[in-house]
Image (cartoon, helix red, strand yellow):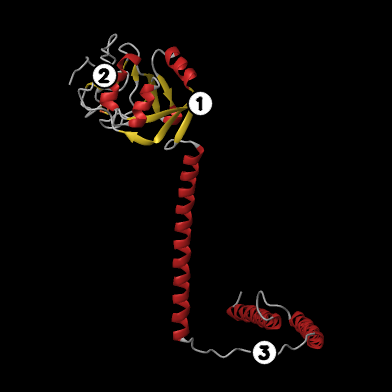
């Protein structure tokens, strides 16, 4: 192959390649690039959007027109003008409130106190502790004391009731003559002893073996009629007045008579068996 032929062929190939490049470029400019919509498609989209916009504007204007025709126009609310409070009147109101509160509190306190007082007096009038208490026929009481082996406890009177021996009444007159209501009970054969120990106030129980009262707190001991036999107590057991009306025994718990002084021993009763607390006469 001659050189002239080779040059001719090269020119032809170059011409074909150039034509292909031109055709490809014109195609690209026609579609607007890779991934872009065609011109017809974009034209169609613009037309649809325009229609949608005009219809939404129509709907909106229709709704606005209908609202405007049906809603009543409310007048603006009236705002009251602010006026500064009268400080004098305010002070007056505060004072009046405090006065009323004070009076109310005082009335409530006084009312409560009066109610408590009335309840207390009412209870006393009804025969509770602190008043005269009718405890039953004296013969029955003596029978109960004997059944209970010498000691009868009456809770309503907070008292121990025991028999006073007839043979000791002359000594009782000397020792207890100054306590008329107490002696009157002894004369009827009865002693009503306050349950509270005169030492520090414990409730004193009976001791069935010694037949004394023996205090478990500090060991004070008293014979059956409450005269001190031992321990730290400053005197014998305190007691109440007793009266008998038509055979009915009454204990007056409104007055507490102090117990007899240490050394008083009108009955001469010694321990009748083992003591419950310590030894007789200890301390
Ligand atoms: S309280 Fe009874 S002996 Fe002390």
Q: Mark 1 and mark 3 in contact? Answer it, CB < 8 Å.
A: no
Q: Name which of mark 1 and mark 3 comes first in the sequence.
A: 3
- What element does badge 1 sit on? loop
Q: Quadrant of residue 260?
A: top left
Height in image: 112 above or below 36? above
Q: Position of residue 28 (x, y in %)?
A: 67, 80
CB of residue at label 3: within 8 Å of ligand 1? no
User: Ligand 1 appears in which quadrant?
Assistant: top left
Q: Which residue is mark 2?
A: 266
Q: Position of residue 222 (x, y in %)?
A: 27, 21
The Cα atoms of the two marked residues, 1 and 3, are separated by: 95 Å
Q: Which residue is mark 1?
A: 246
42 vs 252, nearest the viewer: 252
Q: Which of label 1 and label 3 is nearer to you?
A: 1
x 66%, y 82%: residue: 25
- What element does badge 3 sit on? loop
């Amino acid at each position: 192959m001659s050189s002239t032929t080779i040059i001719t062929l090269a020119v032809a190939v170059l011409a074909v390649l150039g034509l292909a490049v031109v055709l490809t470029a014109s195609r690209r400019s026609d579609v607007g690039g890779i991934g872009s919509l065609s011109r017809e498609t974009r034209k169609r989209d613009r037309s649809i959007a325009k229609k949608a916009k005009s219809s939404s504007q129509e709907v909106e204007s229709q709704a606005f027109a209908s609202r405007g025709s049906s809603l009543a126009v409310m007048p603006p609310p009236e705002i009251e003008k602010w006026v500064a409070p009268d400080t004098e009147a305010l002070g007056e109101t505060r004072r009046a409130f405090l006065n009323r509160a004070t009076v109310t509190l005082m009335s409530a306190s006084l009312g409560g106190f009066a109610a408590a007082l009335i309840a207390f007096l009412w209870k006393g009038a009804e025969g509770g502790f602190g008043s005269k208490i009718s405890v039953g026929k004296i013969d029955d009481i003596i029978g109960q004391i004997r059944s209970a082996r010498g000691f009868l406890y009456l809770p309503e009177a907070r008292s121990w009731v025991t028999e006073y021996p007839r043979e000791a009444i002359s000594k009782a007159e000397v020792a207890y003559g100054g306590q008329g209501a107490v002696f009157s009970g002894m004369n009827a054969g009865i002693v009503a002893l306050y349950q509270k120990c005169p030492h520090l106030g414990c409730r004193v129980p009976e001791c069935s073996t010694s037949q004394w009262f023996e205090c478990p707190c500090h060991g004070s001991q008293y014979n059956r009629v409450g005269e001190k036999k031992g321990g730290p107590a400053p005197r014998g057991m305190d007691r109440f007045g007793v009266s008998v009306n038509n055979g009915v025994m009454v204990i007056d718990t409104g007055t507490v008579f102090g117990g007899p002084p240490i050394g008083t021993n009108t009955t001469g009763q010694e321990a009748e068996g083992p003591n419950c607390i310590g030894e007789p006469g200890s301390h």
